[in-house]
Image (cartoon, rainbow, N blue to C red):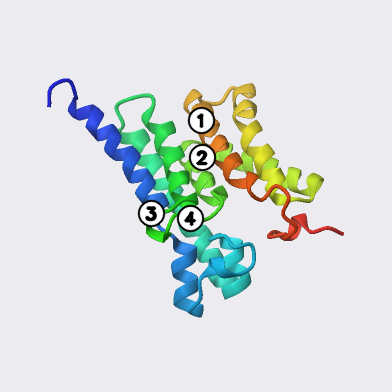
Amino acid sequence: MPGISVDFLLDLGLAFLGYLCGSLPFAVWVTRWLKGADVRSSGSGHATATNTLRQAGWGAGVLVLLLDITKGFLPVYFAGRFGNSEWVTPVTAALTVVGHCWPVFANFRGGMGLATSGGAILALSPLGFLIGVAILVVLVLLIHHSARASVVTGLIIPWVYRLVGMREVLFQATLALGLVVAIRFLVDWNRRYRELWLDREK
């Protein structure tokens, strides 16, 4: 195919693989396997680890959390290792979370993207992952609303990483991730249901 290099096709394949990995709806599968129910039918209505925990117990919730982090980690790790272009890692990270939020394997009704975003950040910087978690926890404790805290976290962490002089690819990836997470959580901006214990009203 004239004008299209093998390297470019490989990069596209890595990005597409990110979307497919993100689309693996572990919360849906695990809850259906253990309880015979769709995790999205109650609670927050989302395919998340915390909603799985509420419906199927701690073991199931922790399993889904680890699987969601892993499916964010692996595509971004491989994009960083085998990609040929600067754009492939940020795009792969964003598409992985897009897949989690709007999964092709679950009628485009998925989770909120936090755990999968965390896995993507972890693949780029363990320190960046810890900083991101710390910012989210602090904001949830201050705002007492996980959806709003997640939107704010997604929008500010790229600039925090840049401020402290972390890798440029981390800034680029989290800029894309933050936009996806913010868009996803905006649908729950006014929700009353509190999915996390940290953001329950006193």
First-in-chain label (4 vs 1): 4
First-in-chain label (4 vs 3): 4
Q: Is residue 185 above or below residue 86?
A: below
Q: Which residue is mark 1?
A: 170
Please tell me whether mark 2 sits on a helix, a strand or a loop.
helix
Tag 1 and tag 3, C-beta contact below 8 Å = no
Q: Which residue is mark 2?
A: 121
Please tell me whether mark 3 sits on a helix, a strand or a loop.
helix
Disc 3 crowd rating (10 Å Cα; few below 14, some 14-19, many 20+) is: some
Marking on residue 104: 3
Which residue is drawn at the image coordinates 55% and 71% (left, top)? 59
Measuring from the top left, give residue 141's x and y in whole percent.
Answer: 78, 49
First-in-chain label (1 vs 3): 3
Tag 2 and tag 4, C-beta contact below 8 Å = no
Q: Which residue is mark 4?
A: 68
Q: Amino acid at mark 4?
A: Asp
Q: Amino acid at mark 1?
A: Leu
Please tell me whether mark 4 sits on a helix, a strand or a loop.
helix
